[in-house]
Image (cartoon, rainbow, N blue to C red):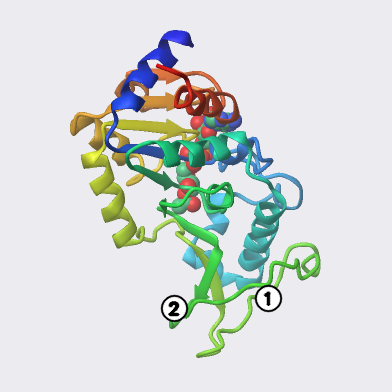
Amino acid sequence: MRTFLDSVRDTLGKARHVVVFTGAGMSAESGIPTFRDALTGLWSQYEAERLATPEAFRRDPALVWGWYEWRRLRALQAQPHEGHVALAAIERHVGRMTLITQNVDDLHERAGSREVLHLHGSLHAPRCSRCGQAHALSTVWPGEPEGGRRLAPPACVACAAPVRPGVVWFGESLPADVLQRAAAAADDCDLWITVGTSGLVYPAAELPQRAARAGAQLVQINPQATPLDDWYAHRLRSSAATVLPQIAALLHEPG
Ligand code: OAD
């Protein structure tokens, strides 16, 4: 660990632009299950991939909306952990930091991170499924969906069509402007730190490879191996809440 931190300290100290790329493992220590964990409790008999699609929403909007409201509540009840706080501290101490997340919770923002790119959208940005009008959601849970699974989506205030979650579903494109900004950060950064992603989903998983081709030093923090391991100069088999505070502490060490 020491040589790893020594190496990261050198690069972090000289870095003009640091990118941190996070996945569901970043939220795991805040109590939010990772994407490919078995869905717990109420939803154990559903495959996430079968709920997170436009077809599922057309087929049964109340089931899909109920699932996302359950996930949104989990995110509201969760608290950022010391790894989220450490990333906000790093952002304040380096020349420039871009935080690219695949996560749809708002834990990075609640920990104080300012430049956050949500590649896969956000649970907190629902919009009309027809006209795209943003929809304000109460942060008060509307009560357990009737029957424990379904909750009718609200109607758009502008056109009365059903409101949908503001997340990217399987088969949908990522928001073009966000992907373009993330790709530009990959081309420009000197240090790329990946935290808590299995590296299975594209085009997100292409971004660290793009940074490596552009000459950045790549660091990965993940207790498990991933298919992208060979792209990383440093692979730390540890957790977000363990390592990130140690990296942030490097910025306060004298000399
Ligand atoms: P996954 O569930 O695929 O992977 C989570 C990764 O985090 C795994 O590699 C774990 O080993 C690692 N992990 C678990 N606990 C950790 C911890 N405490 N610290 C660090 N790492 C930890 O989630 P993602 O890779 O984020 O897309 O999944 C990517 C995308 O797949 C999601 O954004 C979602 C899904 O399809 C959409 O919804 C469009």
Q: Residues within 10 Å of mark 2 (few under 14, many from 20)?
A: some
Residue 162: name its quadrant. bottom right
Residue at coordinates 31% horizontally, 23% vertically from top-left? 11
Numbered label attached to residue 152: 1
Numbered label attached to residue 132: 2
- Disc 2 C-beta below 8 A from ligand 1: no
Q: Amino acid at mark 2?
A: Gly
Q: Is residue 44 left or right of residue 122?
A: right
**Marks 1 and 2: which is nearer the front?**
2
Residue at the outermost front position: 254
Relative to 10, say whether 181 is above or below. below
Residue at coordinates 25% horizontally, 35% vertically from top-left? 211
> Who is closer to the viewer here, 42 or 210?
210
Q: Residues within 10 Å of mark 1 (few under 14, many from 20)?
A: some
Q: Does residue 133 show up?
A: yes
Residue 152: image location, x then y, percent? 68, 76
Residue 161: image location, x then y, percent? 53, 85
